Amino acid sequence: MMSEVDDLVAKIMAQMGNSSSANSSTGTSTTSTSKEMTADDYPLYQKHRDLVKTPKGHNLDDINLQKVVNNQVDPKELRITPEALKLQGEIAANAGRPAIQKNLQRAAELTRVPDERVLEMYDALRPFRSTKQELLDIAKELRDKYDANVCAAWFEEAADYYESRKKLKGDN
């Protein structure tokens, strides 16, 4: 069902002219460029270094091994940004790889969630680890606290799937 919603939103965005602002639900519109990303734009770090920034907005050329060795670069600056993930997702979608785009959308959303919490959420998705309500509570947290709607929908889908397959806590 989510793919149908994503397809509808993508069609609406296309009809609106694919504005240059990022769309958090589909990731199909461009972020800081008006050019639509295609497979020819891959890899971004080689072909569009100007679009790939660190979390604090530094250019890739500002990061080098010597600065890392000398502790002149905060390790958090080596993380990928949601914007880069969305651009990679746009490339994947335009290359006919919607599943990869969806994975990159989830990853972009999860950059806002603390690492420890991501691990807890991942553990909650393991079969027989959570009740349906616990999974739905995580979905609500993702949606309300982190504006992670794609991930929230994924947890809701998992809750229903685990219920239908008897994979919830207490089913074993």
Image: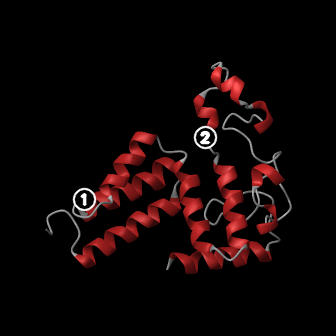
Residue 148 x/y as whole percent: 52, 55
Residue 104: name its quadrant.
Answer: bottom right
Comes first in the chain, label 2 or label 1: 2
The amino acid type found where label 1 is placed reads Ser
- Which type of secondary structure does the marked residue at label 2 adopt? loop
- Give residue 130's mark: 1
Is residue 153 placed above or below 112 in the rendered structure?
A: below
Is residue 165 placed above or below 150 in the rendered structure?
A: below
Is residue 83 placed above or below 18 in the rendered structure?
A: above
The amino acid type found where label 2 is placed reads Arg
Q: Are marks 2 and 1 in contact (CB under 8 Å)?
A: no
Residue 76 x/y as whole percent: 59, 33
Query: Which quadrant does the C terminus fall into?
Result: bottom left
According to the picture, the residue beneath numbered tag 2 turns out to be 79
- Display colour scheme: secondary structure
Residue in view at x 63 percent, y 78 percent: 7
Q: For this rendering, which residue is in front, 153 or 53?
A: 53
Q: How many marks?
A: 2
Q: For this rendering, which residue is in front, 155 or 137?
A: 155
Is residue 88 placed above or below 120 in the rendered structure?
A: below
Residue 97 x/y as whole percent: 64, 74
Residue 102: name its quadrant.
Answer: bottom right
In the rendered structure, the answer to whether residue 113 lies left or right of residue 83 reads left
Residue 28 can be seen, yes or no:
no
In the rendered structure, the answer to whether residue 164 lies left or right of residue 146 reads left
Residue in view at x 32 percent, y 68 percent: 159
- Which type of secondary structure does the marked residue at label 1 adopt? loop
In the rendered structure, the answer to whether residue 100 lies left or right of residue 93 reads left
Residue in view at x 27 percent, y 61 percent: 133
